[in-house]
Image (cartoon, rainbow, N blue to C red):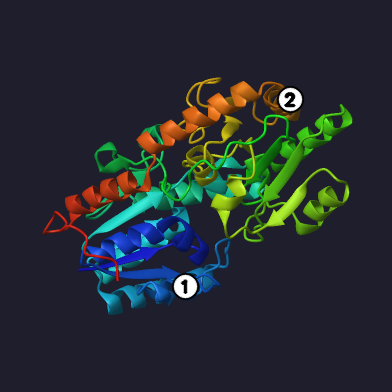
Amino acid sequence: MRIVLFANTDWYLYNFRLAMALQLRDRGAEVVMLSPPGSFGERFRSHGLRWLTLPMDRAGLNPWRELGTLQRLFQLLRSEQPDLLHNFTVKCAVYGGLAARAARVPAIVHAVAGMGYVFSSDRIKARLLRPVVSGLMRGVLGQGHSRVILQNPDDAETMTASGLVPEERIRVIMGSGVDTRRFRPGQPKNAQQRLRVLLAARLLREKGVDEFVNAARLLRDSGRDIEFLLAGTPDPGNPNSVSQQEVEAWQAEGLLRWLGHVEDMPTLLNAVDVMALPSYYREGVPRCLLEGAASGLALVTTDMPGCREVVTRHGEDGLQVQPRDAESLAALLARLDDDRELLQRLGRNARSRAVEHFDERQVIQRTMEVYDELLPTPSWPEPQPSR
């Protein structure tokens, strides 16, 4: 059995879907990773996985270039003849669905983690693209022998209410999961030490980066000694990305410490107290919140789709901040700075919820169950010892 996993970056496949690929491999499937070229792709080979590249511009609008991408994707799928194609993100779902239909791929899974820039941004470009993308999704996602995996109930309701996907084809699996054995609480911290707050995400404005910076400024100006850390890099392929010059200016102003891309996230998370994500983006289920929860951090996020699946009750498994409100964020962080007992309780409850609901082994098992619905010989053997 051959399964192709197709995403718009090799970074996504490596960081979010490697564990699933290895589980599929250990259960006897031949797994092919497919993405545009990048620096992470070579790592797949060290795990015994094939990696194929497809030149693809995530934000591309040139019709001739996009048709060329579709043609190359069709040729690749016709050559590989997979039993199942699993697409990640809206653009890969649309392109993968079109090419797979032409190449007669027998089974297709579309995974859409959040509604993305086109549906969440108020920019003119996004508003112009919205009906076009909606029409393509309506014509592709609900067709053929396929299923659509969404990460939260809000997106499922939006998809069905808009007529984009028939309800019977949708499966909700909350997030890409987190390895709760790798991400776990570290040593207890000194209650008198300086509070350390982390935002770890793509540096998009909709993730609440500006609010995070402004909260840091408000707390500094009020005399609070709280350390703000920012992990992640600008995303040139997204029109709403913060620029590197902006981040460097914030660091020069003394508002935060910019870490860039962080390879060893478990170690970083064991060195901080709070994971903040003041997002007003249509998230799937944010991976940074899952990693923070598994690491026993206090979570501060918004009551937005995807985020509310992780922090379900304000004051119990995290704190919910008003979107686009730096003052609200600053007030909640000051509360955690003053109340270290609350800080610890929120972290313990977040960890318990991560173990119960978001462990990646559960996510992988549920994904295989979706595959079973589409493949002619369902049920997977027990995994063989890792090679």
The foreground one among 128 and 123 is 123
Is 278 drawn above or below residue 288 in the view shown?
above
Residue depicted at x 71% and y 34%? 195
Left or right of residue 232, residue 84 in this image = left
Of the residues under marks 1 and 2, which one precedes in the sequence? 1
Q: Amino acid at mark 1?
A: Arg
Residue 252 spot, x, y in % from top left: 87, 51
Q: Position of residue 2 (x, y in %)?
A: 24, 69
Q: Amino acid at mark 2?
A: Ala
From mark 1 to mark 2, how far is it between C-alphas? 42 Å
Quadrant assignment, res 300: top right
Crowding near pointer 1: few (<14 within 10 Å), some, many (20+)? some
Count of numbered circles on the image:
2
Tell me residue 294's x, y (percent). Answer: 47, 40
Residue carrying label 1: 43
Around disc 2, counting alpha carbons within 10 Å, would you say few (fewer than 14), some (14 to 19), or many (20 or more)? Answer: some
Left or right: residue 31 versus residue 39 is left
| Residue at the (33%, 43%) spot, across then down | 165
Q: Quadrant of the C terminus?
A: bottom left
Label 2 element class: helix
Given residues 27 and 379, the one toward you in this image is: 27
The answer to whether any part of residue 155 appears in the image is no
Asked whether residue 287 appears in the rendered view, the answer is yes
Residue at 36 percent of width and 63 percent of height: 5
The image shows residue 150 at horizontal and vertical percentages of 38, 43
The residue tagged 2 is 334
* Quadrant occupied by the N terminus: bottom left
**Residue 159's quadrant in the figure?**
top left
- Front residue of 249/117: it is 249
